[in-house]
Amino acid sequence: MAEKPWSGRFSEKTDKLVEKFTSSIDVDKRLYEHDIDGSIAHCRMLARSSVISEAEASVLSNGLAMIKDEIKNKEFVFDDSLEDIHMHVENRLTAIAPKAAQKLHTARSRNDQVALDVRMYLREEVYKILSKLSLLKKAVTGMAREHMGVIMPGYTHLQRAQPVLFSHHMLAYYEMFKRDSERFIDCLKRIDVLVLGSAALAGTTYPIDRFHTAKLLDFDSVSENSMDSVSDRDFVMEFIAAASICMVHFSRFSEELVLWSSSEFDFIVLPDAFATGSSIMPQKKNPDVPEIVRGKTGRVFGNLIAVLTLMKALPLAYNRDMQEDKEPLFDTVDTLKFCIDIYIRMLPKISINKKNMRNAASKGFLDATDFADYLVAQGMAFREAHNCAGKAVAYAIGKDRELKELSLSELKIFSSLVKKDVFDFLVLERMIDRRKSYGSTGTENVLNALQKAEKEINSEDVVKKKK
Ligand code: ARG
């Protein structure tokens, strides 16, 4: 068992169960590359500031690079008694370069070190998420482009409301995922801050240059307050909050795919490769993939609540409770990336049942608003027109027909303003295309929106920033 770095003050060995309880290595070993890169930058800065010699810095950097390879090649031995990734790396470095390793932890503490590692990790993951979201937005607009012209019912209260273009419906999801990307980009501002050099909580007596460390690790800014630096996990909460909102969007999309693939709707067919059968009912093809995505929303929300609860009553500055931030954070990153990936693959393989969508848009009085608009165009005030159209609908329901299936003389019962051109007015395509307001479902507007979205995606410049 390795000697603890704090053993000087202690007269008893740590209880075995306590070692297991306090150890976080199984979780935080994922941070090893960032931990090592942070340490290399730290010792370079220390040498530049003459806190250690250049020769010592080289020995330390080489040793650290060696440890990185060992972990990468799975030659590294992890051990609960060493608690976390920071102590594992330092312990191994002590074996490789016993003298120099004694100096690595000068002017820092694990409190600022762990905050640095998590920030470096999350910064990298956010860039990965952004490029995945970019592909997802491509898949969504791809569907909008492929099925341009397909008409479906638009719903409110899950009741058929007015006809819309399927592409318009898809572009609604484009907007949601676009806002998600914007939120993640915004999070980066608060993630991409160097906290190293805040030490345990009060800063350090050594003449360090935190701005140089920030430059070496490509951080956008340097944190202002050492106490805040070691105790701030806002960036974790903020990221999981943004991920939760993104999962809301996936969950809503999934819900629609589940509904649309049911026999009741029959609007889409999910690819066989993305569905499963039943072990008892031979006819079944279940939409398990969207269902599981919808289900995974719960764990991401849970992760958000876990971190909010974890942080809510912590006094300044670092508290060990904060070690519990990593599991929810890592799980959120993994879950979100997995859901994005699965959607990127599934969406282009979904087939659309245009005929059923169109039929559904033709039944259920989705033209009632347009009938009222027709009367308004003939000079009637909208409220009165709404009332007339309502009466016409009630009459048609009694006859078990649609408005457009009534005769001209029947329609005239409700207003003498009705002429034969009303039937033309109520054709689905005309209803769609009369909607010319900015942001509406009219073909021209949707084509413009689609073009704008495609341009936005193509000009997106998601570069993977550093380590
Ligand atoms: N494993 C710890 C964490 O994740 C690292 C910091 C420990 N600091 C301390 N003073 N015990 O928070």
Image: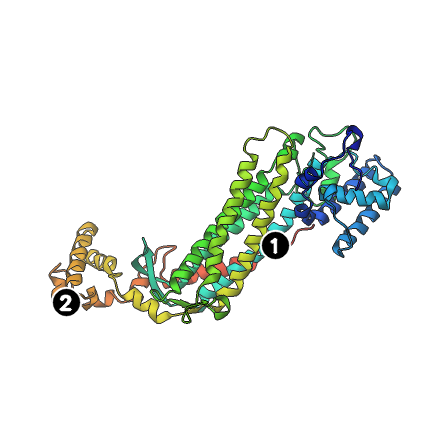
User: Label 1 neighbourhood size at 10 Å, few (<14), some (14-19), many (20+)?
Assistant: some
Q: In what element is the residue under mark 2?
A: helix
Q: Is residue 233 visible to the viewer in this orientation of the structure?
A: yes
The spot of residue 105 in percent (x, y) is 78, 37
Q: Is residue 379 visible to the viewer in this orientation of the structure?
A: no
Q: Which mark is residue 291?
A: none
Q: In what element is the residue under mark 1?
A: helix
Q: Which mark is residue 408?
A: 2
Amino acid found under the numbered disc labelled 2: Leu
Quadrant in which the N terminus appears: top right
The spot of residue 86 in percent (x, y) is 73, 42
Q: Tell me what residue is drawn at x 34 percent, y 71 percent.
A: 355
Precedes in sequence: disc 2 or disc 1: 1
Front one among 140 and 99? 99
The spot of residue 351 in percent (x, y) is 44, 70
Horizontally, residue 233 falls left or right of residue 63, namely left
| Residue under numbered circle 1 | 128
Specify the quadrant of the image occupied by residue 287.
bottom left
Q: Quadrant of ligand 1?
A: top right
